Image (cartoon, rainbow, N blue to C red):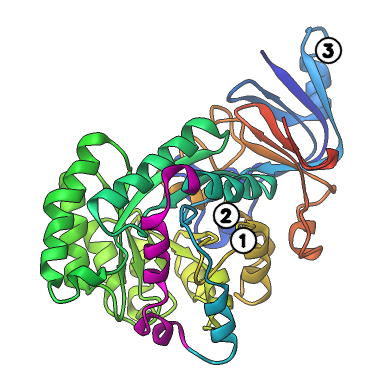
Amino acid sequence: MSLLLTNISELVTVHTPQSGRKTGASMGQLGIISNAAMLVEERIIWIGTQAQADRLFRDRSIERYDCRGRAVMPGFVDSHTHMVFAGNRADEFSQRIRGVSYQQIAARGGGIMATVRATRAASEEELYTAARQLVFSALRHGTTTLEIKTGYGLSVESELKMLRVIAQLAATLPVRIVATLLGAHAVPPEFAQRRDDYIAMLCTELIPEVGRAGLARFCDVFADEGYFTAAEAERILTAGLDWGLQPKIHADEFADVGAASVAIAVGAASADHLLHINPAMIPEFARWRTVATLLPGTAYTLRLPMPPARALIDAGATVALATDCNPGSCLTENIQMVLSLAVQLGGMTIEEAVTAATAHGAAALLLEQDVGSIQVGKYADFLILDSPSIADLVYHFGTNRVAEVWIGGRCVANNSVGNSFL
């Protein structure tokens, strides 16, 4: 059934060309329609001004919804999260505040391995219950599409367990969820002396099993100092491609290990982090379709320099923003906070940050033809803010500026009535 949304102060379309990308100066052009209206079903049927709607639909019996002079924008697309996990690493956070590094904590058996131990011991029900709360919180803050990675199982059995939990979340919650296999998050202790055997297991056992079962869309590798080398990452991602898993890569977060080059070489959907990207590689992201996904929340939490957003945007790269929600280095599911960090500390404008967290998040998940902007034919996934202006997302920081969340033309969360889900 059609629904006409009326009395929209500004409709922030983030309109994109057919490519789904807005690079360079166009990242700052949000395609805002003032005094707007929008006709939706599951997908968007029509957009225009209120005056046009009054003329076109005056004599038609269409249900109307009054947006009461508030702004409407696309739902956020969070293209990098680790929301399925067990355990708590607040103690590690306290250690880092006192000056212990992420790498030092990992060397003592903490870090990723602490979460691996807890996740392996948890049941699917326990993992689902914990992740469900994070997903619902992300939804309340405006995320309508999100990616969830594995990577805390690091065995065939436990990685498949995580993927089943992600599938259950996707089947039972209104958020659009995309699964990524991150078996190459780290080398588990039982393979510490047999590193190549672990990589062989990923390439010949786990990846084929996931590919045959259709449990993930992407294959990811943590290519960085102390984790996987560029050559190992290319081997694993190539194996993923052989089984229909599109490549993604955690690239050059702690050091320049050449991971950005691997991302371009294998045609990765995205290269994420890039805190220590080789400057010579930045122009390459403008030449190819790999999205540069920046995670300023992680840099903030780890007290590292912000990623080079300004250089990438000015070079013409497709730049996305995501939360990196995870238990160790960035425990936030609020992508509005990420926008604030990107603008205040990362050198981006409000408009660029909005594009990065919507249209370009969709591009990082290869979903740019369906979500990420308000355009005729795309899914009616949008937010009604609690104010008339998009600027309040960053200006009034530390609060939730989203009043209502709509997915597929249906209101699924209304923060103005006691954070209830509809």
54 sits left or right of 183 in the view: right
What residue do we see at 45% from left, 59% from top?
318
**Tag nearer the camera, 3 or 2:** 2
Q: Name the residue under label 2.
A: 357
Q: Name the residue under label 3.
A: 58
Q: Label 3 near label 1: C-beta < 8 Å?
A: no
Q: Label 2 near label 1: C-beta < 8 Å?
A: yes
What residue do we see at 17% from left, 44% from top?
208
Quadrant of the image for the C terminus? top right
Determine whether 267 is above or below 11 in the image. Answer: below
User: Where on the picture, by quarter, is residue 75?
Assistant: top right
**Residue 203 coordinates in the image, percent (x, y):** 14, 55
**Residue 154 coordinates in the image, percent (x, y):** 28, 59
Badge 3 crowding class, 10 Å Cα cut-off, few under 14, some 14 to 19, many 20 or more, is few
For the residues labelled 1 and 3, the Cα–Cα distance comes to 37 Å
- Identify the amino acid type marked 1: Ala
**Residue 124 coordinates in the image, percent (x, y):** 42, 44
Q: Name the residue under label 1.
A: 353
Q: Give, as a single range, the part of the protein colored magenta.
A: 101-126
Determine whether 277 is above or below 101 in the image. Answer: above
Q: Is mark 2 on a helix, strand or loop?
A: helix
For the residues labelled 1 and 2, the Cα–Cα distance comes to 6 Å
411 sits left or right of 228 in the view: right
